[in-house]
Amino acid sequence: MAFDPNQQAALSGHGVAGAETMPSFGNSAGRDLLGRILPPLLAVGSVIGTWWLLYLIYPRLLPSPLSTVNEAHRLLSDGTFFFHMYQSLRRVFVGATVAMVFSVAVGIYMGTVRMGEHFFQPLVVLGLTIPGLMWALIAVMLFGINEFASYFAVAVTTFPMLVINIWAGVKSLDKELMDMSHVFHFTKTMKITQVILPQLVSNIFAATRYGLGLAWKVVVVVEMFGTSNGVGYQVMKSYQVFNMEGVIAWTLTFVVAMIVIEYGIINLAERKLTAWRPKIDVWRR
């Protein structure tokens, strides 16, 4: 039986219909990687460029980026950074964890029980109006120079913000899922663990990011006034001798530590816990 040349061409790589329009996976992956890396690099480069330009125009106002990087390298090489950063991280995570546990409980209670909403709402609003600086000063005056003062200041300052986020998440839960839990006679524990908490994962991670950012600010203030170690103590120490390079170096290392926590811990945990959710791209190109 003779083989039709047209069929042979159709079966070959060049004759497959639509082969010329098939996407190149290698090029697509490369463009996607470049799209992820290039914008952050441009953002960081613009900040460094602006900093260098200001240094060239007003050399007495700001230290040069190079001298600041050398100061940061010295802090890293002699171990000063790791010791004081550990002290600050411990205070941040202990206070933020305490606030997160209570905020999740209170936020769910406010979103599910009308009486709880009426009781806690004015207290939460009151807590939102008090600045973190005032809580830091009150904590030091009440408890003195000790670790409990920093834990208390962080927990009290971040608690209202976290409650607002969790409360809003509970009020926007899927009504059909809640109705389903009623139909299947879920207990209150089952409703919380199997219906409410899974839908609050995104809200909890958003609250975690916001809470950690606020906790850092409060801890630095407490350490400036009431501790003998930590990043805030070192920043105040550099400020007292007008060491601008030291202040900026500690600030930069502080920011780098937060970026590592964000992308190395929080982002990975969020992707793993929300992998079951469908991805929705709204107006993204």
Image (cartoon, helix red, strand yellow):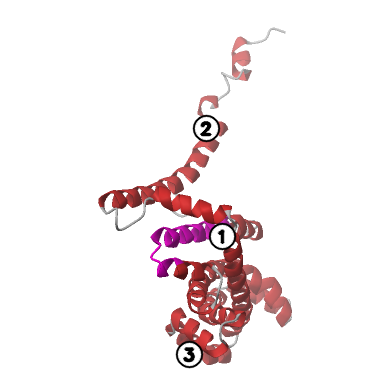
Q: Nearer the viewer, residue 236 or 257?
A: 236
Mark 2–mark 1 Cα distance, whole angstroms, equals 42 Å
Q: Name the quadrant containing residue 95.
A: bottom right
Mark 2–mark 3 Cα distance, whole angstroms, equals 56 Å
Disc 1 residue crowd, few under 14, some 14–19, many 20+, Cα 10 Å? many
Residue 190 image point, x, y percent: 73, 76
Q: Residue furthest top?
A: 2
Q: Residue at x 68, y 79 (%)?
A: 182
Q: Name the quadrant containing residue 163.
A: bottom right
For marks 1 and 3, the one nearer the N-term is 1
> Relative to 201, does residue 13 appear above or below in the rendering?
above
Q: Nearer the viewer, residue 78 or 55?
A: 78
Residue 129 image point, x, y percent: 42, 84
Residue 231 image point, x, y percent: 52, 67
The residues colored magenta run: 238-263
Q: Secondary structure at mark 1?
A: helix
Circle 3 residue: 122
Circle 1 residue: 81
Task: Give the main secondary structure, helix, strand or loop, of the magenta stretch.
Answer: helix
Quadrant in which the N terminus appears = top right
Q: Secondary structure at mark 2?
A: helix
Q: Is residue 115 left or right of residue 125?
A: right
Q: Name the residue type under label 3.
A: Pro
Q: Residue at x 46, y 88 (%)?
A: 126
User: Pointer 1 and pointer 3: residues touching (CB < 8 Å)?
Assistant: no
Q: Name the residue type under label 1.
A: Phe
Circle 2 residue: 27
Q: Name the residue type under label 2.
A: Asn
Residue 281, disc: none
